[in-house]
Image (cartoon, rainbow, N blue to C red):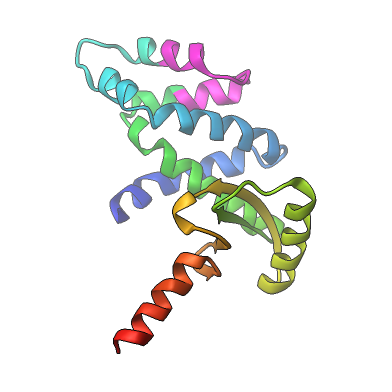
Amino acid sequence: MAELATIARPYAEALFKASSSDLNSAAVWVEALQEIAKNPQLQQFSDNPNVTAVQVFDVIAGVAKVALPEMAKNFLRTVIENGRLSVLPEIAAQFQALKNAQSGSADAVVYSAFAIDSAALADLAATLEKRFARKLNVSVELQPELIGGIRVVVGDEVLDSSVKARLEQMKVALTA
């Protein structure tokens, strides 16, 4: 994993510097490209020695859900020509980390057993921002195996108040 991070760092830093005038729009297309790059069929297609970099670029540009500005196209061409398509998700993660560091915010993923309505999510986000003492970009992912409650991941910090975690704690306490 450290190797991927090492390979991705120069790409992420170069992209960050090049798009410093409009980081938010760059973040949108980088996110879209990394979602496409995660596709195993695309990886297999791009690894085929009979397929050219232009063909891989055309496939990705064709399925992209967002309009790719010229900077995005040039960036994608560079990544493909250097054989780094598989590293694109890590490049996107490092780019997002650089963007967050500049704005003083962090990404927070809230895992919940049930869907959270927008009002409750806004209240939760405000509470979490006080708890973690920074601006958070909150996203929600459903995990029914939590049974109830939530689990919040902000960087390397985890706040777990799920029923599953409490049951595990009781199990450890009873068997000790």
Q: Residue furthest front?
A: 174
The answer to whether residue 119 is above or below residue 132 is: above
Q: Locate residue 62, reporting x and y percent.
A: 50, 11
For image coordinates 58% across by 55% down, the residue present is 110
Quadrant location, the C terminus: bottom left
Q: Is residue 70 magenta?
A: yes
Left or right for 96, reference 122: left
Q: Is residue 11 visible from the viewing direction of this image?
A: no
Instruction: Report x, y in % for residue 102.
Output: 67, 56
Q: Residue furthest left?
A: 49
Q: Is residue 104 above or below residue 52?
A: below
Q: Position of residue 165 (x, y in %)?
A: 45, 70
Q: Is residue 155 visible?
A: yes
Instruction: Please indicate whether residue 22 sits to the left or right of residue 86 in the image.
Output: right
As drawn, is 110 to the left or to the right of 36?
right
Magenta residues span: 57-76
What secondary structure prevails in the magenta region? helix
Q: Answer whether residue 102 is magenta in the image.
A: no
Residue 73 in picture, x, y percent from top left: 53, 20
Specify the quadrant of the image occupied by residue 124.
Answer: bottom right
- Judge whether 127 appears above or below 50 on screen: below
Count the numbered circles shown: 0
Front-lying residue, 73 or 146:
146
Residue at (43% x, 39% y) in the render:
89
